[in-house]
Each structure stands twice: as structure tokens, then as C-alpha cells.
Amino acid sequence: MTEAMSHRDRISLPGSALLSFKRELEKLEEILADGEELAIQAAAIRGMTNGILALTDERLLFIAAGILTRRFEEIPVEAIEEAKAGSGIHRGELELVAGQEKVRFVAVNPPERAAMIAGYLQARERFSELTESQPIPLFEDDPGELPEPPPATPQPLREAATLEERLVELHEAGILTDEELEAKRKLVAERAEEQAEEGLEP
């Protein structure tokens, strides 16, 4: 078993599913790349096929390795545009949009893992948008005096505060370790400061 898997065993498959998906778990160990970190595992159904969902820091995997039915799908995390989990009678459902294609999983077990996966992907998307965005100059030439900005919280700080709240939620849910939380907090703060220095702050 890889180091990444042992690091995340607190959110691996529940004991009741370990024997049922033994072949899938063996396949998962084979296909994980060196350094790829496994975040969340769950049993799920895709179409009419039973298998396991495995979310890593790089991709979402669906693996079915039954005697009669075999299926393998992978979606790069960066390609996932939307992620949402069902609630109420639809609890345990996970719907994704990747490349304008909808991908749906049902009977996610344990059901709360659907919301954990969706939350992880949503937070990662917002984090990427904040850290990868570049300031766009308002003027190509010297604009002279700029108007006074309105007395509102600057956009970078609002985004940073929202992202910080989401990171804390992921930490409380057990998705982020203490070290990961502090590292991501530091990166968010550094990016907000950079945007302020580049002229996005008043």
C-alpha cells in the first residue's frame, strides 16, 4: 500500500465494504502514481455498475473489477467544472460536469462521502481561481488620477475570507490535515498580499 493511502486511511472504505471491493482496491493501488495523494474513497454505482470512487489530488477514479463487469473511468480534477451532492431522498448522489458532460454516481456509500467529494472539488476550484488569477490592468497608458474607490471590502480580501472559511470546513471534516490547512492558509494570505501590492487593493 502506498504512503499516500496510509496517510488517508481515516476516510477510506468502511470495513463492511473492504471484502466486497477487494479486487477494486488492489487495482487502485496499482494505478496510483508516485506521489499521488488519495483523499476520499467510497462505494458507488455508475450506470448499472457497482464499484468504488477514489478521489485523489489529481483525479477522480471509478473502478469496477467484478467477475462479469469491469469498468475504469478517470476524470482529471482540473477538468471538473461543477460538483454537487444530493440531499434528502437523493442523499448519496454525486453529479459532476466535466467538459460539458454530466457524470452521475448514485448509492454512494457511506452517503456523506458524496458531499465530502463535492465539497473538496468545490473548494479546490475556488482555491485554484484565487491563486491562479492574474490582475488585469485598467489602463494601458497613464490614466492620470483615479477615482476614489468605494468604501467596501476589497475583492481579494473577500475571496480570501470565503476560501479560508471553506478550508476550515474541510479541515473539520477530516479532508485536510493540520499541516495542509496551515500551508493553504499561508498561500491564500500571500496571494491576497500580492494582489494588494499589484494595485488591486485601494
Image (cartoon, rainbow, N blue to C red):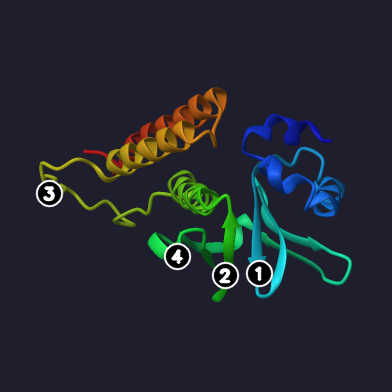
- The residue that mark 1 highlights is 46
Alpha carbon separation for disc pair 3 and 4:
50 Å
Are the residues flagged by discs 3 and 4 in contact, CB closer than 8 Å?
A: no
Q: Which residue is mark 2?
A: 104
Q: Position of residue 33 (x, y in %)?
A: 81, 45
Q: Residues within 10 Å of mark 4 (few under 14, many from 20)?
A: few
Chain-order first, disc 3 or disc 1: 1
Up-down relation of residue 72 to residue 155 (above or below):
below
Q: Which residue is mark 3?
A: 147
Q: Which of the 4 image quadrants contains residue 59?
A: bottom right
CA–CA distance in space, label 2 to label 3: 49 Å
| Disc 4 to disc 1, C-alpha distance | 15 Å
* First-in-chain label (2 vs 4): 4
Q: Is residue 164 above or below residue 104?
A: above
Earlier in the chain: of badge 4 and badge 1, it is 1
Image quarter hosting the C terminus: top left
Q: Position of residue 179 (x, y in %)?
A: 56, 23
Asked whether 5 or 201 is in front, the reply is: 5
> What is the crowding at mark 1: few (fewer than 14 residues within 10 Å), some, or many (at least 20)?
many
Q: Is residue 186 left or right of residue 46?
A: left
Amino acid type at mark 3: Pro
Q: Are marks 2 and 4 in contact (CB under 8 Å)?
A: no
Tell me the tag on residue 90. 4
Disc 3, SS: loop
